[in-house]
Amino acid sequence: MNGPWAFCYSGVSTANRLIYQFTTLSANGQVDATVAGAYLAELTSLRSFFYWQLIDLYGNVPYDNDFANAQAAPPQVPRATVFHKCCCRSGNKCSPSDKKCRWNNLWPNELLGRKILTGKLYMNSQVYSGTAQWDAAIAACDEIINSGNILWNPIILPISM
């Protein structure tokens, strides 16, 4: 079980580092704020994806998103805390600059990926937070289905043994 743990925390650490760098470069005027904002949205979504994997596999996990002051051993927080932070940050609050993905080979439609992650989090919200959020799950899934970005294959092939 160390493989997924190391993989996910490596992803969280990398996302934290890049978020810190884009924030600093944007604040110093070295990167356009709109461009930085698009990257920050993607990186935040990726970090939420890694945290989702962690809470799904392990429950309560260490949580620290402060790269500049990162702790060697961050405190473990309840699964519900990470769930709420992931939902708030990966949710449907998107600016127009978020609509276009910059890393097309990494996550083809970052906004759609963010919505899928939000739907998955809400579908399991009772496990993650103790409170079922079925209406939010349905709304997130309806938005994905009705986006026109999902192609359904109407052909179901029989499997022969």
Image (spheres, grey):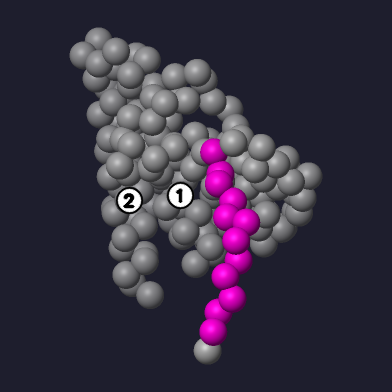
Please state if 140 lies on the left or on the right of 160 as rendered.
right
Residue at the far right in the pictured view = 135
The numbered mark at residue 92 is none
Q: Amino acid at mark 2?
A: Gly
| Residue at image location 35% in from the left, 48% down from the top | 12
Q: Position of residue 54 (x, y in %)?
A: 46, 60
Question: How many angstroms separate mark 1 from mark 2 (CA)?
Answer: 9 Å
Which residue, given by chain and number where applicable, does mark 1 sit on? Answer: 49
**Vertical relation: 14 (above or below) 157:** above
Residue 96 picture location, percent across and down? 50, 18
Q: Is residue 23 above or below residue 3?
A: above
User: In which quarter of the view is residue 147 placed?
Assistant: top right
* Residue plotted at (60% across, 66% down): 156
The residue drawn where x is 62% and y is 41% is: 144
Q: Is residue 152 magenta?
A: yes
What kind of element bears circle 2? helix
User: Mark 1 belongs to which amino acid?
Assistant: Phe
Q: Residue furthest left?
A: 30
Residue 68 in view = no
Q: Which residues are magenta?
A: 149-160
